[in-house]
Image (spheres, grey):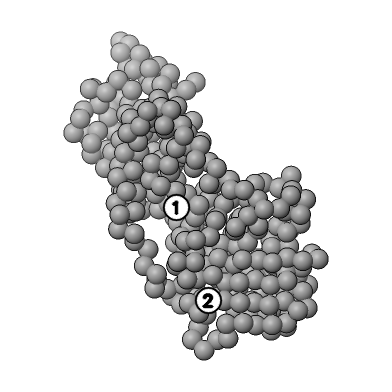
Amino acid sequence: MDRDAMSGAAAGAAAAPGRRAEAPEERFEAERGRLRAIAQRMLGSTGEAEDAVQEAWLRLVRTGPAEIDNLPGWLTTVVSRICLDLLRARAARREEPADEALPEAAGGGPEPEREALLVESVGRALLVVLDRLGPAERVAFVLHDGFAVPFDQIAPIVGRTPVAAKKLASRARQRVRGTAALPPEPLAGHRRVVEAFLAAARGGDLADLLAVLAPDVVRRADPAALPPGRALVARGAQAVARETTVFGRRARYGAVALVDGVPGILIAPDGRLRLVLRMAVADGRVAGYEVVADPARLAALDLAVLPWPG
């Protein structure tokens, strides 16, 4: 039974003799989990999502549930508009300071539990890619592709016609999926090598790293990615493996994604992009990788979510 039908059934039950009508708090709590999930995917932050849901409750109190025919639909619209306003304000501020400390510089502690759960449920790479969409694109994509909201309901939220709202979601979908620069079989092989490298980096095992690195592998890095005085270029499997064991502290925040059409690695604590590893693969091993940390270079990269293998 869909939510509108459930809402109608509940209303009918409340009207029957001897049945207690649901309090506004109960009706809202029944929708809270869904509203939080919508807001988390739109905003990429559990804290901001909770604030958006709480603001929706305050607006419901001011409006009065008795004035609302379709409470689930009304709450979806209100939360989505709150998120859209927040996304537009975020885009206008261009927040995300370039000099924010990387994880290990701040002690290397784990992600806060709530943010880690969000990353796990949504996907680290998807959160990064969603953060690159325009506000209206993100709202339309999340509502339609994530929660099956029809475009005639999305249209007034984003201030477009249903046809235009559909185009927003379609454009967002194309950006999320990206376009691979390799045919399926080489793409899958490249992906396996990158995933093996990331697993070895996370484990910090020198032997596992040497097994996945080519003997003449080269690692390059932007200055912002390294501690002061560290060489920007490392050559040879032994040197690169040792460098990568240090990088392993960041690898816990890594996810494999499409980077300019080929598999690479995003380093994104809390789903917020900090570094990208552009990976070169040859003969089943990592032939080289570049650590991109410069904000302008990061912004210029084409990032997308890799499809599930198989």
Q: Nearer the viewer, residue 261 or 203?
A: 261
In the figure, 174 relative to 159: above or below?
below
At 58% from the left and 45% from the top, the residue drawn is 177
In the figure, 272 relative to 135: above or below?
below
For residue 148, side relative to residue 68 (left or right) = right
What residue is shown with label 2?
222
At 38% from the left and 17% from the top, the residue drawn is 8
Q: Given this view, does label 2 or label 1 mark the residue nearer the observer?
A: 2
Amino acid marked by disc 2? Asp
At 73% from the left and 65% from the top, the residue drawn is 281
What residue is shown with label 1?
131
* Residue 33 makes an appearance in the image: no
- Residue 13 on image: x %, y %: 36, 15
Amino acid marked by disc 1? Asp
- Residue 310 on image: x %, y %: 74, 44
In the figure, 58 relative to 69: above or below?
below
Question: Of all residues shown, which one is farthest toward the bottom?
Answer: 229
- Residue 72 on image: x %, y %: 36, 28
